[in-house]
Amino acid sequence: MFRVVVVVAIAVGATSLALPAGAVSQSYTVKVDGAAAGKPWAFLRFFPGASLRVHPGDVIDFAWAGTDTPHTTTLVPDADPSVWRQDNQGQGDAYQDPIPDSMVGGDDGDLVENPKVVSPTDPTCGTETAPCSFDGTSVVSSGFQFSNPTAQPSFFASVDAPVGTYSFLCLLHPGMEDVLKVVPDATTIPTPAEVDTKAAKQLTKAINVDGAAADLQAQTIAVGVSRGGGHTKIFINAGGFSNQVSANEFPGIPISANVGDRIVVRGMPEIHTATFPKKAFKTTPFVVPACEQPGADTPAQSPADCANPSQFELVLNAKALAPTKSNKLKDPTKFVNSGLLVVPGTSTFIATAPGKYTFVCLVHGPEMSGVIKVR
């Protein structure tokens, strides 16, 4: 997996301290995602939230702060990020993701991550010493980056746009977006330290309120009305989701079922799978890096592995995306898959034979796994 860090712009309200007209450019840090100790949660938000105000020439350090969830930090020339998404991320649009590989010269019928989403708009900038310039007329993006707590990536952007309102967002996660306001030098705005303080307070609230709500949702096991023959439906959620906080977990306690019972897994706004057995995560990766070429593609780990680095692509594994023909749990070692689960979709498994059945989300890995004990 690719791991890189991204820094994100922060929203704040007015404060008592002003930065005077003609002041030296300031550097603001915006947290991309967040982390809660010991919790498999993803905060699909920028911290702080609300519009970030900067002066022309200020620099924003978009800094990854999560665990292992990928994001982009993408500055766009639109005051409304939702409108920009409607115009640019729909079917056939430039930033549609994923896309058929035929749209980028492929011939395998695969579904791949859009290169315009995966790649930075300019790989020669984005560092602290060489920030990318956002002039308010075109898109500036970090590209596809993974949080890595041991070496978080960052993406630096210099706000060289005229006074006005713009946006920044994650191309991968709907709803992960914010407004950027460029104001005249004479306008009082919060200091970088005040922005940091507000971001920290918002993350604490997100952990205690939204994270707790998402966690409760993910841990809930409900039993439905009895069916004929005494069998029941057991309902669980594919994780939990509250106010852009995703609890990437299945119930932490074993789920008890009897032969004949149905286990219904309900989708959430974040994508997941429910896949048996747990070890399928090792044999059926959700994303397969490859070099595009005529005929069968060749495996790769990075663009450097391809004769032409531009032919590197991230292929979404069809076996992971599609549900298996059989939904019966009759052998704990047999591969059974929900396919991609999203709200309001569900997937139902039938407990057919006694045993201990382990399952996992192919998107989020072993941290999101569970056990069903069939009697």
Image (cartoon, rainbow, N blue to C red):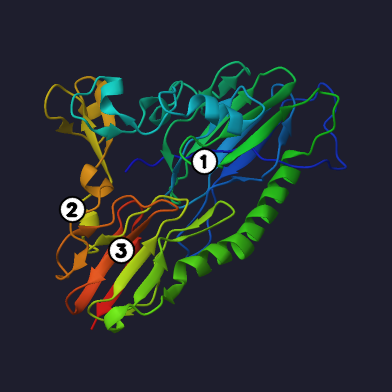
Instruction: Identify residue type, mark 2.
Output: Thr
Q: Residues within 10 Å of mark 3 (few under 14, many from 20)?
A: some
Whether residue 285 appears in this view of the structure is: no
Taking the image as shown, residue 295 lies to the left or right of residue 369, namely: left
Instruction: Identify residue type, mark 1.
Output: Pro
- In which quarter of the view is residue 54 placed? top right
The residue closer to the viewer here, 59 or 328, is 328
In the rendering, which numbered label is found on residue 283? 2
SS of the residue at dot 2?
A: helix
Residue ID at (15%, 71%): 330
In the rendering, which numbered label is found on residue 174? 1
- In which quarter of the view is residue 326 placed? bottom left
Residue ID at (58%, 20%): 133
Residue 280 percent coordinates (x, y): 21, 58
For disc 3, the marked residue is 348
Whether residue 258 appears in this view of the structure is: yes
The residue closer to the viewer here, 149 or 251, is 251
Q: Nearer the viewer, mark 3 or mark 1?
A: 3
SS of the residue at dot 1?
A: loop
Q: Residues within 10 Å of mark 2 (few under 14, many from 20)?
A: few
Nearest to N terminus: mark 2 or mark 1: 1
Instruction: Identify residue type, mark 3.
Output: Thr
Residue ID at (64%, 59%): 204
- In which quarter of the view is residue 8 placed? top right
123 in relation to 53, above or below: above
